[in-house]
Amino acid sequence: MISLEANSSPTPEELPPEIGGLRMTKQRREVFSVVLAERDHPTANDVFSRSQKRMPTISLATVYNCLEALVSHGLVRQVNFEREPSRYCPNLSDHCHFQDEKTGTIHDVVFKEGVNLADFLELPQGTEISHLEISLKGRIGSH
Amino acid sequence: MISLEANSSPTPEELPPEIGGLRMTKQRREVFSVVLAERDHPTANDVFSRSQKRMPTISLATVYNCLEALVSHGLVRQVNFEREPSRYCPNLSDHCHFQDEKTGTIHDVVFKEGVNLADFLELPQGTEISHLEISLKGRIGSH
DNA sequence: AGCAATAATTGGAATTATTCTAATTCGAAG
DNA sequence: CTTCGAATTAGAATAATTCCAATTATTGCT
Ligand SMILES: [Mn+2]
Ligand SMILES: [Mn+2]
Ligand SMILES: [Zn+2]
Ligand SMILES: [Zn+2]
């Protein structure tokens, strides 16, 4: 059994014919493997250019289609910073995002042990949260 | 002295010639008063149509310009939900946003007494947060 | 294997929120 | 009143994303 959490990320060929209920076509495998390969939160365009290296015929529309399929099946997370182009993240564990304003780099940020955000919010009685996004921007301590 | 936090929101005429270092032109007063008038988090287009009622000659470009000026001077908050059009919020107190998926309505959500988000995140040493956005989506308990 | 039905991919056009541009108008200061 | 920088305006441009209609690939039979 292939562990998708393994340290070295899978090549497209190593991905099974179906993941989490999503049929893995050649293009979806390519796109997924690109997203898994680096934790740098690429945009759709980044994914497109990286995919083109191995699969020169893939189209941008397909990259968008594949990303949408992967996101809607919960295999990839879509990450938004204000009005910037969406980015894609293979880290499915509970985390949020910090963008270094100096470099633009996006870092995963985890919650401290046992913290559940909803516990700290005055939400209306009986609210069911289906989606949560926390985005931070700032500078990383320089000295 | 005019309180901008008063229960009944100011008409454009009631706004002073300068707020928080921003010169208040006729259009900026109109746009600001529209944003202050209702806590429904209007889009730029919403602000445009509402402004047109009192000021039929205002242009959409000006509404964008005014909103940008108000946001950059900290008089209005810009609120983003995923890839949806930006919305604008006159509530300057520390809060985040919940969108009811049923109706699309956006509600302000406050943090529980004395909670500081950054305390619950594993941020790299010395990180300076300049901007923070928390967006929730879900359903409001029906029964 | 052959065939029909279904789903995915593709290139290009369309959409749409937002930004840009260049011309005009405004308004504060002298 | 004139000047001059700033703001407003209409309309064009931009850019991320979505849509469309045609082609291609895959699946599930027989
Ligand atoms: Mn999201
Ligand atoms: Mn913001
Ligand atoms: Zn991430
Ligand atoms: Zn708000």
Image: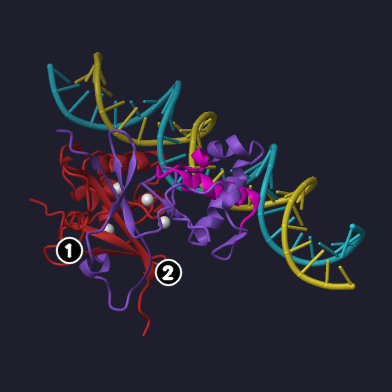
Chain colours: A purple, B red, C cyan, D yellow
Q: Chain of mark 1?
A: B
Marks 2 and 1: in contact by CB < 8 Å? no
B26 above or below A15? Answer: above
Whether callout 1 and callout 2 share a subunit is answered yes
Tell me residue A111's x, y (percent). Answer: 25, 58
Q: How many marks?
A: 2
In the image, the segment drawn in magenta is A23-47
* Residue A139 in sight: yes
Give the letter of the chain under mark 2: B
Relative image position of residue A3 (x, y in whole percent): 48, 58
Amino acid type, label 1: Asn
Name the magenta segment's main secondary structure: helix
Which residue is at the front of the view, A59 or B48? A59
Q: Amino acid at mark 2?
A: Thr
Which of the labelled discs sits on residue B103, or is there none? 2
Question: Does the magenta portion include A46?
Answer: yes
